[in-house]
Image (cartoon, rainbow, N blue to C red):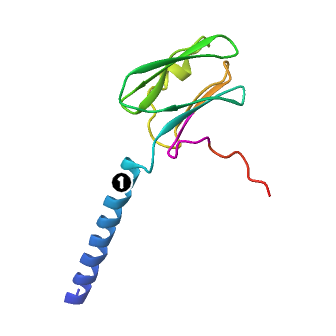
Amino acid sequence: MTRADRYLIAGVLCAALLAAVLIVFRWQTGSGRTCAVIKIQGELAGIIELSDKRKTYEFRGKTGPVILEVAGKRIRMVEATCPDRICVMHGWIERAGESIVCVPNEISISITANGSAPLDAVTR
């Protein structure tokens, strides 16, 4: 291995490390405000801005009430009337693209980074 090969390998490793740090930093800070989009039976039921303040929200699903909790810029489902409670066991979500779905209640919670509901389709 020549000296030039060593410089080339060191340069590639430094560039990869810098790219990884920038990607992680961008992923953690996000762009704009982070919101949770709540849909019940496919219809938009609300958009909740995720903040550091602890708040609870109640929505009515197909089988009964569902309680959501917001704290530390993340959201979770605290109580649900579904039989298996998989949605409650899912825990906290905080990053854009993450979601919680309660199938029996037909409720979905998804995180968006720009504060608006995600597009289902684009037409011209």
x and y percentages locating residue 119 in the rendered image: 67, 46
Name the outermost residue toward the left: 3
Name the outermost residue toward the right: 124
Name the side, left or right, on which 67 lies relative to 53: right
Residue 83 appears in the rendering: no
Name the side, left or right, on which 10 lies relative to 25: left
Image quadrant where one finds the C terminus: bottom right
Residue drawn at x 35%, y 30% is: 52
**Residue 87 vs residue 41, the one in the foreground:** 41
x and y percentages locating residue 11 in the rendered image: 27, 78
Residue 72 appears in the rendering: yes
Residue 24, placed above or below residue 91: below
Q: Which residues are magenta?
A: 110-117
x and y percentages locating residue 33 in the rendered image: 45, 43
Residue drawn at x 42%, y 32% is: 74
**Residue 101 vs residue 46, the one in the foreground:** 46
x and y percentages locating residue 55 in the rendered image: 43, 20
Residue drawn at x 35%, y 65% is: 19
Quarter of the figure with residue 116: top right
**Residue type pointed to by label 1:** Val
Quarter of the figure with residue 86: top right
Whether residue 14 is in magenta: the answer is no
**Residue 53 vs residue 63, the one in the foreground:** 53
Label 1 element class: helix
Q: How many marks?
A: 1
Whether residue 112 is in magenta: the answer is yes
**Residue 101 vs residue 25, the one in the foreground:** 25
Question: Circle 1 sits on which residue?
Answer: 24
Residue 14, placed above or below residue 85: below
Name the side, left or right, on which 8 lies relative to 93: left
Residue 68, placed above or below residue 65: below
Residue 91, placed above or below residue 66: below
